[in-house]
Amino acid sequence: MERVKEWMDQGIITGIADRIPHEHLLHMLMDGISDYIFFMEVVGERRFKYVYMNESAKNHSPIKGAGWEGKYIEDLLSEEQAEALIEAYQTVVKKKEALTYEDEIIINGTLFRGHSVLTPTMDESGEVTHIIAITRNITEVIEKERDLSRINAMYRSLMKDTTDAILIVDTAGNILEANRALEELYGYTKEEMHASSFPFVPSNRREEARELVRKGKERAIAGYETVRQRKDGTLVDVSISVSPIQNEDGETIGISSIVRDISRDKAAQRKLEASRSRYRSLFKHNPQPILTLTFQGLIKKANPATLRLLKTEKDALVQTSIVDWVPKEQRRWLRKQLLESFFQKGTRFETSFWMDGEERILRVSLVPIINEGQKEGIYAILEDRTEQVRAHEALRQSEEKFRLIADHSNDLISVFSPMGELVYASPSQKKFLGRAPHEMSSEELLQQLEPDDLNNLSKAFKWSEESKEAFTVSLTLKSQNGEPVWFECRGTPVVSEQNQVSHFVIVARDISEQKNYEEKLERFAFYDYLTDLPNRRLFEDRVEQAIAKAERSGESFALLYLDGDGFKCINDEYGHEIGDEFLCSVGKRMKECIRSGDSVGRIGGDEFAILLEDIADRDQIYEVSMRALEKLREPYIVKGEEIRSSFSIGVACYPEDGRSLDDLFRSADQALYRGKRDGKNQVRLYEHHR
């Protein structure tokens, strides 16, 4: 208080003092201090009266609510508490100097710990007339110190006694602590690890390790599996769990990780997975239809080729009996074949199958499934012999019968000679091509195929002629309107009695829907399902391309990182459905904000990013960013609700703010954080700190 008077006497705060009386100004200053301030009058020997108390003391003091004005210490505290406090005040009076002390008192059943400074004020004769008491409440501080002591004891025990390897780094990735188990796992001492940055990380895993540290600052990661290198050079499979270490304000100040050696498990897993992978690949991608059966004929699994062959869905086939798919007169015979397959190495036969109301002739090979010497079921390998049998029979008996079958098929059916001459083309080809193939020249026919497809088809014909086996290829044919259409072509050689291929029967089936579905799946992998914007994976790829382009041309570009201000409040107030619609509207508005040639993507949640290419200078970037900010803060009408929101934008420029994807995102994120910290709803360009 004397310092405030001194400032006023020196005219430092005369501007305020001219408008506010000294007494009021002092009260305003005192009431703005969080410490408890008491102004005590020395009335007599061991008699001290309360003259003034600031707002913090009134609101938070243990004597809160008491009528303190004009009261003495003994009027407000218990006898024991008052005696101790009076003794401290009396000491100040006698020694005429300040006194600092800490004490604990119980007020109304509550423990209060305080750190107090008693300062005397004296008159012209040197007698103490008043005492200023400033008390700081350190109750929570003491409790936290004791909690910290207990936590430190537990931490030391954990680091020393746990069998798990533990590593602690700061937010920059510098190693702070490593326990004995980690030293034993990697073979490096703590000092060696401090001297070299992550010596146990292989060179080809450095970027992965940095990314793990970066993500670990944001969230916990459990069971991340990777490879590390021991001091002797050997590699070890490890499982790493990462957690951010946060202070009381929720700020990440470090990262802890628990590392486990999973080398044995991974070796066994790789061996098992290799075996399973070979099996799955053989089963799933095999063009030959394959079923897995019990010895009673119950269908347990079916590969995609089987579903295509039987023209059915998985749910309609699995858990049915293979016996139900053959004509009734063949069922007893088929059951006998299934039973005999248990005692034999395998059996092969032909039978009829009913598929989509049509009888098909299949060659069935039954092979027992043997695991560690135990028979567990049957593989049924199916081969559709219908077309071959019918084509062979038709060609042998009557070409007219063959035409009767082929002319009414929606598939494109053709018969070629071994020299590649077209012998027959089904009427369905005229519907597709607009002209009958016989009316087209060889050049025109070849133009219906892409060069790569023509090359693959030629190789398939050659292989089939040599092996006498059927083949399947996928290719595109141009329809009469010029549009390419995907077909799966099944080629079957017709073998003469002299074991020579006399003809090839080609059946082409439209698989456009399947290809469209595959293309949709590919789009889902690169575009955000909600906003239809590029997802983080595709957007980062575009940034990488921009970096490569800029390195060649010497041009610059900018990365804008956008984060919504209060999107959670929108979800809380209006619900997630409107929240999703709002994000869709934001995505559309984002597209309107960018120029032709720029890119925008949804990174996750309410986080978006914009790539500005071909920029002139930082002023231009700032202008484009501000226009985007103004556009995004305009009201949104979502399902009849008017929603107001805003975004904060952090900007990083290539190359001055970073030359890699991670550096650019990190710089933009730091600029965004600074904008958030300074009040949100604003643009901040990354600034280098010197």
Image (cartoon, helix red, strand yellow):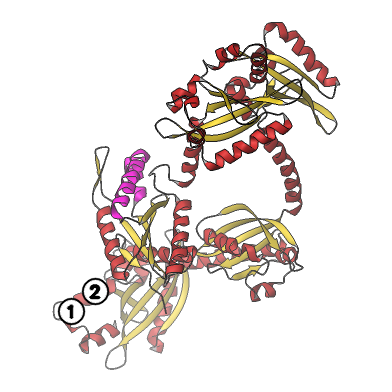
Residue 110: where, in percent of width, then height?
45, 60
The residue located at (18%, 79%) in the rendering is 16
Instruction: Name the kind of residue labelled 1 in the image.
Output: Ile
559 sits to left or right of 457: left
Q: What stretch is highlighted in magenta?
A: 567-595
Distance between mark 1 and mark 2 Cα atoms: 13 Å
On the question of residue 646 being in view, the answer is no
The residue located at (37%, 53%) in the rendering is 600
Foreground tag (1 vs 2): 1
What residue sits right under mark 1 in the picture?
A: 16
| Callout 2: SS | helix
| Image quadrant in which the C terminus is located | bottom left
- Quarter holding residue 20: bottom left
Most foreground residue, 146 or 229: 229
The residue located at (68%, 58%) in the rendering is 227
- Quarter holding residue 423: top right
On the question of residue 353 being in view, the answer is yes
Q: Which residue lies furthest to the left in this view?
A: 19
Residue 273: where, in percent of width, then height?
71, 43
Most foreground residue, 506 or 236: 506
| Image quadrant in which the N terminus is located | bottom left
What residue sits right under mark 2 in the picture?
A: 27
Q: Is residue 296 above or below residue 22?
A: above
Residue 346: where, in percent of width, then height?
81, 23
Determine if the magenta segment contains residue 594. Answer: yes
